[in-house]
Amino acid sequence: MDSSFQLAQQMAQLDMEQRQALLMIASGAPIATCLDALTEAVGRLAPGTRACVLLANHDRSEMAGGYSSHFPPSFSESVRGLPIGEALIGTCGTAIYAGEPVTCADVENSSQWSPAWRQLCLENGIRACHSHPAQGHGSKPVGSFFLCLGEAREPNAWERRVAEFGALATGIVVERERAAAHLRKELDSLARLQALSAELVGPGQFELLLKKILAAAADISGTDKGNIQIWDPAKRSLRIVVHQGLGKRLVAHFLEDGWDASCGEAARHIQRLVVPDVLELEALRGTVGLEIVVEDDIRAIQCTPLLSRDGRLLGMLNNHYRQPGGPSPDALRYIDLLARQAAELIERHQSESELAKERQHKDEFLAMLAHELRNPLAPMRNMLEVQRRSRGNWQQVMEANEVMERQLQQLVRLVDDLLDVNRINRGKLELRMENVAVEDAVRQAVEMCRPALDARGHQLQLTLPSQPVAVNGDSAV
């Protein structure tokens, strides 16, 4: 058969397989269905070959698994978790690490690869292979398309082209799956934020609501560790109010103040701080703080300040991660929204606490003032009775008038205090200090108590100093 005609037939078949693969991907078929079908298509395009798709995890540090219609599940399971890096564990790992195709023309006699990988290939009848990296977003490899030959030889140009098609389609499938997963996570995160917003509008327990905000921030950013602190402007310190996933020693050590290397630094500059790897904090080596953090299996930390509407520091939302790196940019966007919710909750709680204190001060002040208002009324009523019984005794009338005048002045002063809103807010009466004769003070006290003494038939005998004695005080209090 003419080679050009054969090539035309192959290209037509490749075009058909490409269209079918893209239609399946566009239909939203599961990733396993798409990749298994892709390996079947490669087998049709290059008879005598078999194929397998091996995927990397998100940070391309290790193999995450594989898909194939040609090999048993045990084949891809054997490579799951193997590290991707400079160690030559196989052509696929090297292709992902280097970002370029890798070929092994003779698996059995090659000394380039690890014995475990070579043994795995030979047990599955793979004598030669070609791995083509599958590129994802930003041309970063997301996996490798593994084309396998049953004899020791170099793959021909057509087989390399078929492997390239398989890698291209694999990249599209994986990116579609990751985009769908990202969208699902975005929708879940938005739904969670909406539910939290609805809870925060109504009444609720302060710490319980903070715990829900903290749990949402942890879930969205891929961890289970964190805490929320409240800023004490008087002590200039951060106090932990809620936490999750943290050890007792860490909580006890940082309970009343944060770690200088993370939340303390973020508080000083009032801006977010991400510590990608606490082990890189060379200046803190040997410190108790670093020892406690590492002991709690923490490698990365993010600290987001909680700010009032006028820019004051209210506290800190912190998350801790077991792996270096910290949260993704998408996670930080949601943490910002959760931080805004936490700040509004704290600000509202503080305002309500201040209002409650003011109400308490007013109640205490009014109760005290009500007691003080009763004191002048008793002697005034008693003096009215003295006047009624005086029967023209002008001396008694004049003395009664003096007592009532003094008590009326006291009453006027108390009413003035009652009308002084400032004083009510402070919960205090104003002291007017002056030299007060002890004799006068005692006489006024007796005047106030006289009705009670008379009502009970008590006799009162006073012994006063022979010489005037003055004290510095307020005669009305």
Image (tube, grey):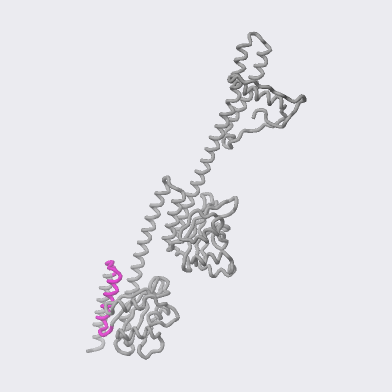
Judged left or right of residue 14, residue 362 is right
Q: Position of residue 416 (x, y in %)?
A: 60, 28
Is residue 29 something that shows in the picture?
Answer: yes
Q: Quadrant of residue 1?
A: bottom left
**Which quarter of the figure is the C terminus placed in?**
top right
Judged left or right of residue 104, residue 380 is right
Judged left or right of residue 43, residue 186 is right
Q: Main secondary structure of the magenta part?
A: helix
Q: Residue at x 63, y 11 (%)?
A: 390
The stretch of residues the image draws in magenta is 25-49
Q: Position of residue 342 (x, y in %)?
A: 47, 52
In the displayed structure, 427 sits above or below 415; it is: below
Q: Is residue 36 magenta?
A: yes
In the displayed structure, 220 sits above or below 54; it is: above
Closer to us: 445 or 205: 445
Q: Position of residue 202 (x, y in %)?
A: 41, 45
